[in-house]
Amino acid sequence: MDFIRILKIIRRYNLLRKEELTIRLKMQNKMKDLKLNLGRLSHILPEIKIPKILKKKEVKEEKPAKLNEEKQLKVKEEKELGYKKYLGYLKDAVYIIMIAISMYGWISTKAKNEAVLETTVKQSTEAIQKIQTFVDKQVELNSKQAEFNGRTAEYMNSHK
């Protein structure tokens, strides 16, 4: 009995592991799609303007026209770094949201499956009880038939 129980546990574990891997694969595919979409959005959307509150305080702000080329490149690189930094934050937030949504889906699916399983068990139990009453009636009829057959044989033997 323990061996059968262990086999059932192993089979259940394998089913759950398979389900987990399919969910992970789906999540990985969705994350790849999200990464592609974010890349497309970064090319489509205009450059982010950083609010004054988030900008580093500079000693003097000169107009880009008066700066030489090195300073212009430096300013441009800083803007790009700021843009990439906030884009990274955005990506992280989206990943966290996607993970939360996936976990919610997994949990709700699991709860739904458990409810369906519970309903199926109840229906199966009811069906088994109905079959059991039918079998009990059949056994009772068979015993009455056997008793009747015995009496009939007894009667036939006594009247020969």
Image (tube, rainbow, N blue to C red):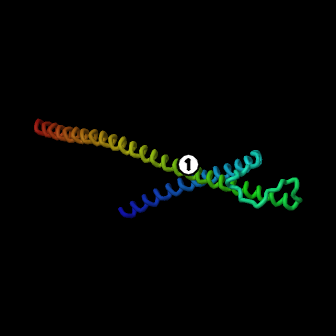
Taking the image as shown, residue 20 lies to the left or right of residue 139, namely: right
Which residue is located at x 55 percent, y 48 percent? 101
Q: Measured from the top left, where is residue 130 in percent x and y?
A: 30, 39
Q: Which corner quadrant of the image does residue 116 belong to? A: top left
Q: Measured from the top left, where is residue 140 in percent x and y?
A: 21, 40
Q: Secondary structure at mark 1?
A: helix
Q: Is residue 17 above or below residue 122?
A: below
Q: Measured from the top left, where is residue 31 in percent x and y?
A: 64, 52
Question: Observer-nearest residue: 3 or 94?
Answer: 94
Q: Which corner quadrant of the image does residue 134 belong to? A: top left
Q: Is residue 20 above or below residue 152?
A: below
Q: Residues within 10 Å of mark 1 (few under 14, many from 20)?
A: few
Where the N terminus falls, by quadrant?
bottom left
Say which amino acid is labelled 1: Ile
Q: Residue furthest front?
A: 60
Taking the image as shown, residue 64 lies to the left or right of residue 134, namely: right
Which residue is located at x 46 percent, y 56 percent? 12
Across the whole image, how many numbered discs are drawn on residues?
Answer: 1
Where the C terminus falls, by quadrant?
top left
On the image, numbered disc 1 is attached to which residue?
101
